[in-house]
Amino acid sequence: MVYQNQKGMAVETDVRYLNDMKMVLYDQKWAKKAPNSELYYVYRGVKKKNGLRYDITVIPPRMLGKEFPKTKGHEHPKGCLELITVLSGKAIFLFQKSKGGKVFDAYQILAKKGDRVIAPTGYAHITINPGPKKLKIANWIDKKCRGIYDFIEKVQGACYYYTKSGWIKNKNYGIIPKLRFEKPLKSLPSNLDFLK
């Protein structure tokens, strides 16, 4: 799949392979034996407007051993917000706020086509495809914002894994707060300047 920007040019495509993801997966036994296959795709800069960048992420429904397919997960620098829209399929967004290796807050949002979610500043987040169909999401973000992966890689993923058995705590963390459940936004903010 190739996406084009407003000028008809092919956009930057980032393919995440299993080898890029092994350090954040729950099922390490499966990960060691599985072939290095493509897991999901990020198309950056499909649109650009007023200093913002519009990206599309596609996550096929391929199980990662016992764990449902997901993005690697990242944090943004302070002040960076991200507006995410589900274009097709179903998504679980997992958010966690941590400092010095301790998690202070963790919550999930279950979203379907048309739902919107804001990834708040100071939170790491991952996107999970819990359904049998391909998940396609889009996001608007300040083009200067970049993902930070260091902490998530160091502790082998987020504080919870979503598996065939439900949510499982990541034992590489210390005390983890109980997972809260939040609802998605039902409408798109009329002005995206809050993302700058």
Image (cartoon, helix red, strand yellow):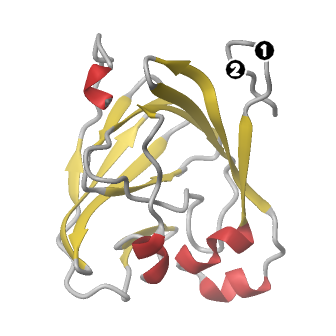
Which residue is drawn at the image coordinates 31% and 30% (left, top)? Answer: 195
* Residue 184 - label: none
Q: Position of residue 51 (x, y in %)?
A: 44, 24
Whether tag 1 and tag 2 are in contact, CB under 8 A, the answer is yes
**Which residue position holds label 2?**
5
Q: Position of residue 59 (x, y in %)?
A: 64, 47
Taking 187 as reference, is 139 above or below it? below
Q: Position of residue 78 (x, y in %)?
A: 26, 52
The local crowd at label 2, few if under 14, some if 14 to 19, many if 20 or more residues have their Cα within 10 Å, is: some
Distance between mark 1 and mark 2 Cα atoms: 5 Å
State which quadrant residue 117 falls in.
top left
Which residue is drawn at the image coordinates 37% and 88% (left, top)? Answer: 172
Horizontal side of residue 111 vs 88, given as left or right: left
**92 or 49: nearer the eye?**
49
Classify the position of the N terminus by image quarter: top right
Classify the position of the C terminus by image quarter: top left
The local crowd at label 1, few if under 14, some if 14 to 19, many if 20 or more residues have their Cα within 10 Å, is: few
**Which residue position holds label 1?**
8
Q: Amino acid at mark 2?
A: Asn
Q: Is residue 162 visible?
A: yes
